[in-house]
Image (cartoon, coloured by chain):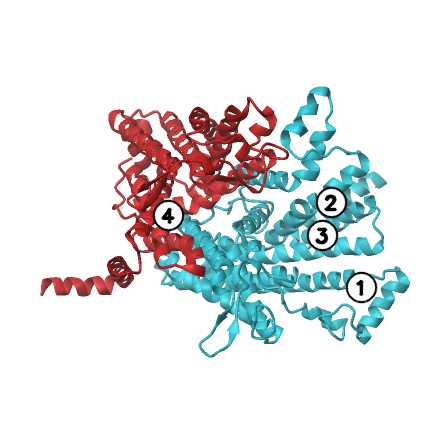
Amino acid sequence: MSSDQFQTGRLTQFRELLERSDAALVLTAMAAFYLLFFVVGTILNYDIAGLISVLGQVTFFTAVYALIVLALNLHWGYAGLFNIGIAGFMAVGVYTMAMLTAPPTGSPPGLGLPVAVGIVGGMFAAALVGLVTALPALRLRADYLAIVTVAISEIIRLTYNSPAFSTFTLPGGITLGTGGASGIGDFPSNPLRAIYYVDPSSAASETTPIGTAIFGFFESVFGVVRSAVIVELTYGLVLAVIVFLVYTLLARVGNSPFGRVLKAIREDEVVAKSLGKDTNRFKIKTFMLGCALMGLAGVLWQGFGTGAVYPQAFRPQLTFYIFIAVIIGGAGSNTGSILGGAVFANLLFLLPQYLPNIIEQTVSIQAEPNNFVAAIGPIVAGEIAPLLGYMLNQRLPALRFVFVGVLLVYLVQNRPEGLLGHRTETAAAVNLNRGHTGSDLTGPEGGVDDE
Amino acid sequence: MEPYARGRRLLRDQPGLVVVSAVALLLVGDLIAKLLGDGLTAARFGGFVWDGLVIGLLIGLAGIGLSLTYSILGFANFAHGDYISWGAFSGWAVAYLLAGIDRYAAGGLLLIGAGDGPAPGDVGVSITNTPASILAGLVVAVGFTIGVSLLIDRAVYRPIREADGITLLIASIGVAFALRYLIVFFFYSGRQGVTDISRVPAYDIGGVVVNAHELTIVVIALLLMTGVHLLLQRSKLGKAMRAMADNRDLAQVTGIPVEGVIRTTWILGGGLAGAAGYLVVLTQGTIAYDLGWLLLLLIFAAVIMGGIGSVYGAIVGGLVIGLASRLSLIWLTGDLSSFAEPVAFGLMIFVLLFRPEGIFGGVSTA
């Protein structure tokens, strides 16, 4: 066997592995993303601390997107519930958590409870709001459910935004509040910091023995003195573990008798009903579980990730990002959800933030007109730099949204099943079509009752 | 005995409806008490009603298109709000250009003051100061939005015409994103003043202050609505639309030019959306890239309330939503006034829960 043949053989083997094993696929994709951002950091001449920070961001955003997309996949992919109020449920989770744990002396005051109570409380509150939404709304047609959930998410956001509840007093004389439009800044510090710092709320505090050892290791080996990037990276890795746990939970749910009923509902609700299943009950439970996970994702992402919470973070845009991530991955597949979240977080969310700097490394763009006419005018004289400068430095976020919108339309038209949606998870516990790649598509339209 | 039994059946079958009706009655009673007492002057009440009518007419105008596309193409078009925004921006760009071309450079005027463009107070656009440019802007807003909606139908919706409602809905979300941020790309992302409100004459009608821009809006909205009414009544179009909403395949075999009717629907709906967006800026005095998106949920509320597919339902629903959101301010005072919009959304949710076919019984009058 020549080395050429050997290599092709290896490649085929690898491809087969990717086709067969979802874990290999996700790991390969993540390796590719890490490599990509390593290259990005190198092009931008980052030092080692900077590189670690970039890779920490990759881990963080991949994990939080994967988490929330998994939760949405439970709603849409498993039970066919078209929920576009995700931002609202996330807001309930993180706000409840913040209001429970913020110090009573803060502005706005909170209840000062431990962080763990806050997280559980946030998930519980999100599940409760999910129940209140689901009880009446699940009887509705899919498109009505969509409108109702987006309206509820806006009601939630406007309620948190309202000055009316910025601080209020409970009947028992306890005062707490949402902070109105400016949100809650007295957010409990990330509990993870307790590993490294004696006083978790202050980066200037004494380090714990573990902190001293790890910071010392990074300082002596890599010369990294910015301990914040190490904390950031650790948080990302912890989130990755949480994603794995949630994935396992959802895989178990999916393969349990409960999950099989869900898939049956998605495929044909009437059949599931005729078999004596109380489909509404199943849907409500699923909706609540998904909402609790959305609340958790809200806490871990908008809460501990940002370190503050404010209502503007929960505009419907957030919901649509997550939807696009699900569609990229393919509704109905948990692995697809993780992959879709990773692709969206890295290629559509993070990469564009570095793009202007990368391009300016290679092409020098001095001109930076602040309006479109001034940018397009010089084209006549053959100067493209003003337009490029306008696009990159003034309007890049807008262009990214335009691209995301066009991508969504493209996916719906050409690949409704997403990247991994073709891996249908059959309702049967045993493999019915061994040696046969399932071709029945369960795309976004799968099992949705279309009139 | 009979009414009693009926009442009990109603209470058992639809307890929610009974509660909602009771609350509504309570509010009406409280309103009358407030009007008779000192809580609320007639002028203040009249002001709320007038504001509600103006915004309600605009919601109704924009709702006609959403309602028609919802029933005929079978999906909730989440991009409709951004058609409205594009109507506003395209129309006002031209209105600005015509009003200020003798004094300012065309570029800054076309971008409605983006970057270093002239300030609205300097351009001085208002219905009394520059009526011709305002009307020309309206025409452009209608024309441009028709063009946008036809183009998007051709590129996005036509290839997936046979797909189900949710697939089309998701595609429309993509369209909404692209359209909204194209506005940011060409114009700006903030909210900016547009009209020269200081020079708009206002009239005192029985204590209610009515300004010329609001009067313009009411007149134009009523004219457009009458036009739609005549078009649908005098031509076969209304009947063809009803047939298509009912069963597209059946309509096709009976010889109705399906694609032609769809195109007409977009022309009608897009044009009215553009006009509504342009006029919304006239009443608000400011323009923002997400103005249509912010209105969209209210428009959905109106359309659902009026019954999807019903043109008259959309208009009445718009008035109900507009009045409800303004009249709720009678009770939502002070810090609570930020709940005017949630009240309208809440109304929509109630209608969906208790009467998903709309208040007017879901009879498509097209």
Residue at image position (82%, 56%) is A49
Q: Which residue is mark 2?
A: A354
Q: Quadrant of the N terminus of chain A?
A: top right
Residue A224 lies in quadrant: bottom right
Disc 3 chain ID? A
Mark 4 Cα shell of 10 Å, populated few (<14), some (14-19), many (≥20): many
Determine the CA span between mark 3 and mark 1.
24 Å
Residue holding disc 3: A30
Q: Earlier along the polypeptide chain: callout 3 or callout 2? A: 3
Does dot 1 land on a helix, a strand or a loop? helix
Q: Which chain is cyan?
A: A
In the picture, which chain is red? B
What separation in Å lies between label 1 and label 4 (alpha carbons)?
51 Å
Question: Mark 3 or mark 1, which has the lower sequence index?
Answer: 3
Q: Residue B44 in the image: state x and y as whole percent.
A: 33, 51
The residue furthest right is A220
Quadrant the C terminus of chain A occupies: top left
What amino acid does circle 1 point to?
Ser
* Residue occupying the point 63% across, 28% down: A373
Identify the residue shown where x is 80% and y is 42%: A7
Q: Are marks 4 and 3 in contact (CB under 8 Å)?
A: no
User: Rounded to the nearest whole Å, what is the CA distance between mark 2 and mark 1?
Assistant: 23 Å
